[in-house]
Amino acid sequence: MYQWDFAFLWSYRWLFLNGLGVTVGFTVAIVGFGLVAGLAAALAKLSAFAPLRWLAHAYIEVFRCTPVLVQLVWFYYALPIMSGIEISAITASILALSLYGGSFYAEIIRGGIVSIDPGQPEAAAALGMTPFQAMRRIILPQALKRMVPPLMNQSIIQFKNTSLVSVLAVPDLLYQGQIAAHDSYRPLEVYSAVAVAYFLLLFPLTIIVRQGEKKLSTSD
Amino acid sequence: MDTQSKIEIAGLRKQFGDLVVLKDINLSVDEGQVVALIGPSGSGKSTLLRCINLLVTPNGGQVRVGADSFAFGPGTKLPGTRALANFRAGTGMVFQHFNLFPHMTALGNVMEAPVTVRGKSKAAAREHALALLAKVGLADKVDEYPSRLSGGQKQRVAIARALAMEPDVMLFDEATSALDPELVGEVLGVMQKLASEGMTMVIVTHEIAFAREVADRVIFMRDGVVVEEGPARQVIDAPSEAATQAFLGHFHRGGAAQPVTGAAS
Ligand SMILES: Nc1ncnc2c1ncn2[C@@H]1O[C@H](COP(=O)(O)OP(=O)(O)OP(=O)(O)O)[C@@H](O)[C@H]1O
Ligand SMILES: [Mg+2]
C-alpha cells in the first residue's frame, strides 16, 4: 500500500510559487496579446478590402486547424531555421499561444459584431456617425456584452494551455512540478498538488463566468 | 438645378445586381413642404428615401439636400466617409423598426449624436434632449431603456433622436407600420406637429388618410418610376393614372388606411 506523504511538498513551496507566477504571467500575456490579435483579425475579416479579409481568414483557419502543441514546437524549432532569427523559448511560447488564442478570439469577436442588427449601424450612419464612431459607440458596446462569456471561456482554455510551454523548458507550474517530482521521487504527490493548484485557480473563474452568463441572459 | 428647393433629385438610378430598382427619378421638395411617397411593396420607396441621405449609394444621377450636392455615375468619384457623414448629419431619418440604441436610455439615445458627431458638450446636449423628449410627450420616460418602452414611445424617441441633430429635412420610412393600431395616432400626431412647424419632410407611408391630410404633395411610385404626382388631395381623391387608381382601390376609403392585400412590407 502506497504511503501518501504531502508534508515534504512544503520544502518545494518557493519552486511551486515561482512556477505559479510564470503560469499566471504567461496567461496574462497570451490573453492580452491574443485579444489584440483576435480583434485585429476580426476587424480585418469584416473589412471591405478583400486581401485583408483573405489574410485574416488564412490566419484564423491555420491556427484553429493545427494542434497548439505542434504550433509551439514549430515556432521554437522551425521558425528560427526559416527566418534565421534565434528566438527564446519564452518568446516562441508567447507567440504561438497568443496567435493560437487570437484565432479563436477572432471568431468570437466577429460573431459578436455580426450578431448586431444591421439597423443599428444604419441608424448610426443616418445620424452622421462615421463607421469608426458607429463601431466604437454603438456596435462594440452591444457586441461586447454578448462576447464576454465566450471570451472568458476561451481565456480559461488559454490558462490551461500554458502548461504546454513546459515542453520547451519554460519554468511554469507544470515544469517546476516535474523538477520537484524528479528531485523527491514522489511524482504522485507532486503532480496531484499541481493539479489541485490549477483547479483552485480555475474553478472560481468558471463560477464567475457562469454567473456572468446568467446575468446577461436575464438582462436581455 | 432649381436653387429654391430644399431637396433636389435628378436622373436618379439605382440597381442591386441586375435588379433595377430606381429608373431616372426626378424629385424636388421645397423648404417646409411635406411629400408623401406611396406605392406597392417593392416599388422602390425605401430605396429612394435611402438615396436622399445616401444610406444607399445611387448608380447615377444627382442628389442635393440644402447646399450639399453629390453626383453619381461613370467618371464621378464616390464621396468619402467623412463627406458622407457630414452630409447625413443634416438629414434626420426615422425607421420602420425604430432602431433605437438598446444600451442607452431614451435620453442617451437622443444625446448620442450631438455629442459624438457634433462635439456638443454633455450638458448642452442633455438640455436639448430633455426639451425634445418633452416635445414628443416623453418627459416622464427620459431614463427608461428602449426595452421598457411601447412601440409608439420608441418611435417618438427615434423622432427626438433625429431632431437632436437639428436636421434640415426629415425622412420617414413607414414610421407607423410596425405599431399596434392604437399606437399609430401618437406617432402621426408628432409628425403632424413637425409638419405644421415647417419641417421639410419626405414620408413613405401606407397611411393614405394621413398623407391626404398632412402632405402637400403625393408621389405614387411603381416599379422604380414615378407614375403620378401632384397635390395630395388631387392624387388621392381623383388619381388620373390607372395604376394609381388600382393601388388606392386596395385601401378602405376614409378611416385608418390598411392594405387589404396584406403585402409584407
Ligand atoms: N440591399 C438590397 N439588396 C438587394 N435588393 C434590394 C436591396 N434593397 C432593396 N432591394 C430590392 O429593391 C426593390 C425595392 O425595394 P424597396 O425596399 O425600395 O421597396 P419599397 O417600395 O420600400 O417596398 P416596401 O413597401 O415593401 O417597403 C425590392 O425588389 C427589393 O427586394
Ligand atoms: Mg420600404
Image (spheres, rainbow, N blue to C red):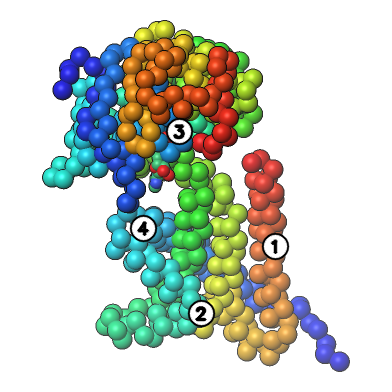
State which mark lies toward you, 3 or 2. 3
User: In terms of image quadrants, where is residue A186?
Assistant: bottom right
Callout 1: residue from which chain?
Answer: A
Distance of label 3 from label 1 (alpha carbons): 59 Å
| Amino acid at pointer 2 | Pro
Residue identified by numbered label 4: A44
> Which residue lies at the image location 71% right of the left edge and 71% below the top edge?
A196
Question: In which chain is the residue bearing label 3?
Answer: B
* Residue at numbered disc 1: A203
Between the residue at mark 2 and the residue at mark 4, the CA separation in whole angstroms equals: 24 Å
Mark 4 vs mark 3, CA separation in Å: 40 Å
Mark 1 residue's CB less than 8 Å from ligand 1: no
Q: Nearer the viewer, mark 3 or mark 1?
A: 3
Q: Position of residue A96 (x, y in %)?
A: 43, 73
Q: Is residue B172 left or right of residue A175?
A: left
- Between residues A179 and B211, which one lies in front from this camera angle? B211
How packed is label 4: few (under 14 Cα within 10 Å), some, or many (20 or more)? many
Residue B56 pos. (x, y %): 33, 39
Give the distance between the C-alpha atoms of the residues marked 1 and 4, in whole angstroms.
Answer: 34 Å
* First in residue order: circle 1 vs circle 4: 4
| CB-based contact (under 8 Å), mark 3 and mark 1 | no
**For marks 2 and 1 on the same chain, the one whose residue lies earlier in the sequence:** 2
Q: Residues within 10 Å of mark 3 (few under 14, many from 20)?
A: some
Residue B40: numbered disc: 3
Q: In front of the other: label 1 or label 4? A: 4
- Which residue is painted at 32% across and 33% down in the image? B225
Give the Cα separation between the discs numbered 2 and 1: 25 Å
At x 22%, y 29%, the residue is B10
* Residue B232 placement (x, y as % from top left): 39, 14
Q: Name the mark on residue A67.
A: 2
